[in-house]
Every structure is written in structure tokens, then in C-alpha cells.
Image (spheres, helix red, strand yellow):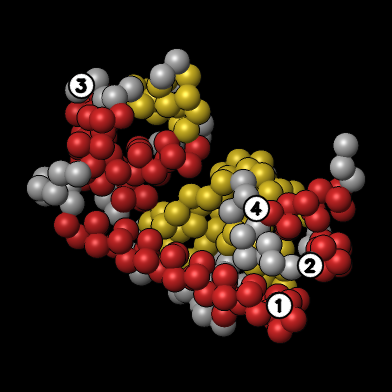
Amino acid sequence: MLTPLEERVRLLSTRDILEPLPPEEWEGLARRAPDTHLEPGEVLRTPEERVEKLFLLKKGRVRVYAVDPEGREHTLAVAGGGSMLGEMAITGQRLSGVYVQVMAPSVVCSLKRKDLDQLVLRNPEVGSRLVRLLSERLRETETFLAGLMKRSVLSRLAGLILRLAENEGIAINGVYEISTPYTHERLATMIGSTRVPVTRALAKLKEAGIVEMKNRRIHLVDLDALKHAAAQDEKN
């Protein structure tokens, strides 16, 4: 069994942007990246957070959400174990109104910006990979926002369920179970809608035999039909 330090070294060495580091760098980096244990409902990051850090979610699940001027929450992403968060902050960018909240018992370690800056100076490939990661995240966000404007609630919900199944789906007898229970209101914040239209759209998917709900968890029954529903562009 690995010691806590050895486990942090192993985890850091598997991250794509840190993979170019020589082995001697990993232990020192791991010593400066202590674990933080968090429970559901705790907030990992707020817009007022001044310390610029890169967070590595070792296990658990968190959601990234924004609050609009009227106080409504809009979920931007849900991240699981192995994900990196905060890459915008370490570039000096501040996203107004963005929070990171824990959804399941989680373990997080963090790297301060100054530590990452030093790594980039010694290992330019780390900086190149970080730039690529930022570009990918920006492209994903632009695609997400474009979808909110053009697609129906049913289409957006179907697309969301596909992403959730890809990120946290567990295959059971040919059916994908999404491990995290999501309320209709939470699903609505993730597609830029409200609870009532999402409830109606979910009912249509259930009536069509595409998904089922068991113990508040979504079960994906017909993958092809769900992909077809996600591809529909007509607004409701």
C-alpha cells in the first residue's frame, strides 16, 4: 500500500500537464500539495478567493457554477476524480460569480501559482500543455453556450445526460446508471433552463423508453435514441 506522500506523487505524475516533469520534481511538488478532505455542500472556491491555485480533485465530485445578477445558479460543469480545476485563476483571470461546490465526499490537493510558475520556467512543456488545456476548456464553454441558444430543452437535457453518462456512468446489464442523484432543479441549472420544462422533457424521455429513474438516479436505457434526441435543434 502506498503512503499518503507516495500516493500524491503517483497522482501528480499521471496528470497530463505535469507528466513531462522529471521524477525528482514530483516528490517536492507533492510535499507542497497537501490533501484537503471536503464534505457535500462545502464550497471549494468562491469569486472572492484571492489565492491563485490549481486544484486536483483526487476523488469525489464537484460542480462549477455561476450566480447571475438575479441570484439564480447556473451549473457550468460537473467534475469527477482526476480532474483539474482553477486553471483560469492561475493565469490571472477571474471569472465573475463562479463557485466550486462539493457534491460528494472529496479529497483535493492544490498547487499555488508560484509553484506552478517555477515548474513552467524549468519545464516549458508544462506551460505548453497548460495552454492547450485552457484552449480546450474555452472551446467546450463556447460550444456549451452556443447550444443554450439554439437547442430545445429536450435536446439540451438529452445532451447533458449523454455527458453525465460518459463522465460517471456505470454499465449494469447493458444500461448506464449515472452514479450521482440529480434533482430536476439541478439538471435545469446545468442546461440554462428551469425546473418545470426539465421535468416535462424528462417525462418525454421516460415515456419514450429512453431513460428510467431509479432511486433518484438516471438510467440510460436506449443510447441511440438519446443521441438522436440530443441532435434535435428545433426549439420548444
Query: For the residues marked 1 and 3, what is the alpha-carbon distance in whole angstroms?
Result: 55 Å
Distance from the alpha carbon under mark 3 to that under mark 2: 55 Å
Observer-side mark, 3 or 4, equals 4
Above or below residue 123? Residue 235 is: above
Q: Disc number at residue 20?
A: none
Precedes in sequence: disc 2 or disc 4:
2
Q: Which mark is residue 207?
A: 3
Residue 72's x, y, as percent?
Answer: 37, 58
Residue at (33% x, 22% y) in the render: 221
The residue positioned farthest toward the top in the image shown: 173
Name the residue tied to disc 1.
123
Residue contact at pointers 2 and 1, CB within 8 angstroms: yes
| Residues at marks 3 and 4 touching, judged by CB atoms closer than 8 Å | no
Q: Are marks 2 and 4 in contact (CB under 8 Å)?
A: no
Pointer 4 residue: 57
Q: Earlier in the sequence, mark 3 or mark 2?
A: 2
Q: Can see residue 197? A: no
Residue at the spot of label 2? 22
User: Three-letter amino acid code at disc 4?
Assistant: Leu
Residue type marked 1: Asn
Can residue 166 be seen in the rendering of this structure?
A: yes
